[in-house]
Amino acid sequence: MKPTIQSLALTAMLCFLPTLATAQNSNRAAVEQTMQQLMRGFEAGDSALIFEAFRKDGIVVGHSATTGKLVTLTAEEWAEGFPGKPAADEDQRHRSYEILDVTDEVAMVKVRLDYPGWDGVDYLALLKIDGRWQIVSKSWGGKRKPAAT
């Protein structure tokens, strides 16, 4: 019996699926590590830790409800807002993230920020550059919360 092109293609696909799944799991794990580095930077208020995950030449974009304008910063400009120590209300800040998609070279992550004075969402784009996952852009939005009484 002669093998058909379809049966050969199916056999080849079945042989390579475990390899693809392993590569996908490996990339997802590496993105997870990058996100954990970023979270440590947020918690510590430390730009040096932030830059272990975020490229200094990355871009940060959002819309300021206060000014009504689009805000565009370099990652270095954005990181100037980190004081080098945890925020006074760090124990009241809650962050979570969800890895939305990971391919061989691109990933997208959604970050939720629930702070005493801020309720926000960031979307982070990551690229695999020279074998290392790095955040290259952050798009943010959110709203101020009323001051606690």
Image: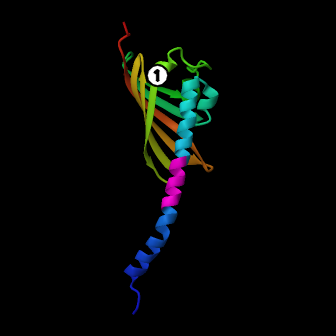
**Residue 43 visible in the snapshot:** yes
Residue found at x 59% / y 18%: 83
Q: Dot 1: what SS?
A: loop
Residue bounds of the magenta highlight: 21-29
The residue type indicated by label 1 comes to Arg
The single residue placed furthest to the top in the displayed view is: 149
The single residue placed furthest to the bottom in the displayed view is: 1
Residue 78 included in the magenta stretch of the image: no
According to the picture, the residue beneath numbered tag 1 turns out to be 93
| Residue 45 appears left or right of 100 | right
User: Residue 57 appears in which quarter of the rendering?
Assistant: top right
Residue found at x 49% / y 48%: 106
Q: Which of the colour schemes (rainbow, by chain, secondary structure, one colour) is used?
A: rainbow
Dominant secondary structure of the magenta stretch? Answer: helix
- Badge 1: how crowded within 10 Å, few (<14), some, or many (20+)? some
Residue 26 included in the magenta stretch of the image: yes
Count the marks. 1
User: Residue 58 appears in which quarter of the rendering?
Assistant: top right
Query: Residue 135 placed where, x, y %?
Result: 54, 39
| Residue 70 sits above or below residue 20 on the image | above
| Residue 101 sits above or below residue 41 on the image | below
Q: Quadrant of the C terminus?
A: top left
Query: Residue 67 placed where, x, y %?
Result: 39, 16
| Residue 23 sits above or below residue 2 on the image | above
Residue found at x 53% / y 58%: 23
Query: Residue 15 placed where, x, y %?
Result: 48, 72
Query: Residue 6 placed where, x, y %?
Result: 37, 79
Return the residue nearer the eye: 75 or 86: 86
